[in-house]
């Protein structure tokens, strides 16, 4: 589970900030995640977690600071250019098309990968490769029997799995997941936990999650955001016991659950 220490970090953030008018949603955050690292981000509602992800994926431009992906500065790149560089993400609010089938949703995500206008024969081959890849992805998460079903008939847990699949379809090197277990039943939570544990070890994972049980099993380090600031960062078990974290979550059942 521990990432390699050689070479540049998979993700390196230096003094990153984001202002919305007078509100500083992300304030001077610095952290690094090694290749293959499993990293969690926690913090109360409104702490700036999703804003932080929006900065990483390029949906928002920072007011200050730098973002590097495997040593390369991506701070000024557009979201599609960052996807091409290997940043993949899910959104807190789902981006699945409910009336399209699982296969169609996956194919659309895979189409996002094709960069050039292809000749008809090559296009036909590429389509076939995409179909195979869609089936492979669905099969790897136990969704093969759902390929021809419209997304709207999937269970909440299956939808969450499809969201992760759509992000994986862009072949990320760094995968950002925004609360993948939110709103799931205990059984569904277990499924998604297993799925996350089975992700390729070469993939670097950064995950916003409130469920400490999921975090304990999936990530090895956690950062805590509070009013946009990184207050603590360290091994999951230590962070959970940290007095500042206990204070932030006082009266909340989220830590220690
Ligand atoms: N586009 C925006 N314009 C103005 N304010 C925003 C915008 N996006 C987020 N904010 C504000 O920034 C702060 C951080 O929001 P953010 O969504 O990043 O929090 P979060 O940690 O993801 O919370 P949650 O746990 O509820 O998902 C909040 O006060 C929010 O209202
Ligand atoms: Mg959020």
Image: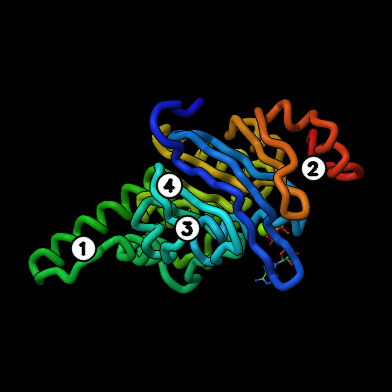
The CA span between labels 4 and 2 is 31 Å
The residue lying at 38 percent from left, 51 percent from top is 86
Instruction: Tell me whether the residue at label 2 lies in contact with that at label 1, contact meaning CB atoms closer than 8 angstroms.
Output: no
Classify residue 94 by image quadrant: bottom right
The answer to whether the beta carbon of the residue marked 1 is less than 8 Å from any atom of ligand 2 is no
Binning the other alpha carbons within 10 Å of mark 4 as few (below 14), some (14 to 19) or many (20 upward) gives many
Marks 4/3: CA–CA distance: 9 Å
CA gap, disc 1 and disc 4: 30 Å
Local crowd at mark 2 within 10 Å, few (<14), some, or many (≥20)? some
Query: Which residue is under mark 2?
Result: 254
* Separation of residues labelled 2 and 1 (CA atoms): 45 Å
Residue under label 4, please give it.
69
Seen at 69% across and 35% down, the residue is: 213
Q: Does 122 sit left or right of 20 as displayed?
A: left
- Residue 103: give x, y in percent of width and height: 36, 62
Badge 1 vs badge 4, beta-carbon distance below 8 Å? no
Against 24, residue 100 (above or below) is: below
Q: Residue at x 66, y 54 (%)?
A: 49
Q: Position of residue 146 (x, y in %)?
A: 43, 56
Q: Which residue is mark 1?
A: 127
Tag 1 secondary structure? helix
Q: Secondary structure at mark 2?
A: loop
Q: CA distance from mark 3 to mark 2?
A: 33 Å
Residue named by callout 3? 75
């Amino acid at each position: 589970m521990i990432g390699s220490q050689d070479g540049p970090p998979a993700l390196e953030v230096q003094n990153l900030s984001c202002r919305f008018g007078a509100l500083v949603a992300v304030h001077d955050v610095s952290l690094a995640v090694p290749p293959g690292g499993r990293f969690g981000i926690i913090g109360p509602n409104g702490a700036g977690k999703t804003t932080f992800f929006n900065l990483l994926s390029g949906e928002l431009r920072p007011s200050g600071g730098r973002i590097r992906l495997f040593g390369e500065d991506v701070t000024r790149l557009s979201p599609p250019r960052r996807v091409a560089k290997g940043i993949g993400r899910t959104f807190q609010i789902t981006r699945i098309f409910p009336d399209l089938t699982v296969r169609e949703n996956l194919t659309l995500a895979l189409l996002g990968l094709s960069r050039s206008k292809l000749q008809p024969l090559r296009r036909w081959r590429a389509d076939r490769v995409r179909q195979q890849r869609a089936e492979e992805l669905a099969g790897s998460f136990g969704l093969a029997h759902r390929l021809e079903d419209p997304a709207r008939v999937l269970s909440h847990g299956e939808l969450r799995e499809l969201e992760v699949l759509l992000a994986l379809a862009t072949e990320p090197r760094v995968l950002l997941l925004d609360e993948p277990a939110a709103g799931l039943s205990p059984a569904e939570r277990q499924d998604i936990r297993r799925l996350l544990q089975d992700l390729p070890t070469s993939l670097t994972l950064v995950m916003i999650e409130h469920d400490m049980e999921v975090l304990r099993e999936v990530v090895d380090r956690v950062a805590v955001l509070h009013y946009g600031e990184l207050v603590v960062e360290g091994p999951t078990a230590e962070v959970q016991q940290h007095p500042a974290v206990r204070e932030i979550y006082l009266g909340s059942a989220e830590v220690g659950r």
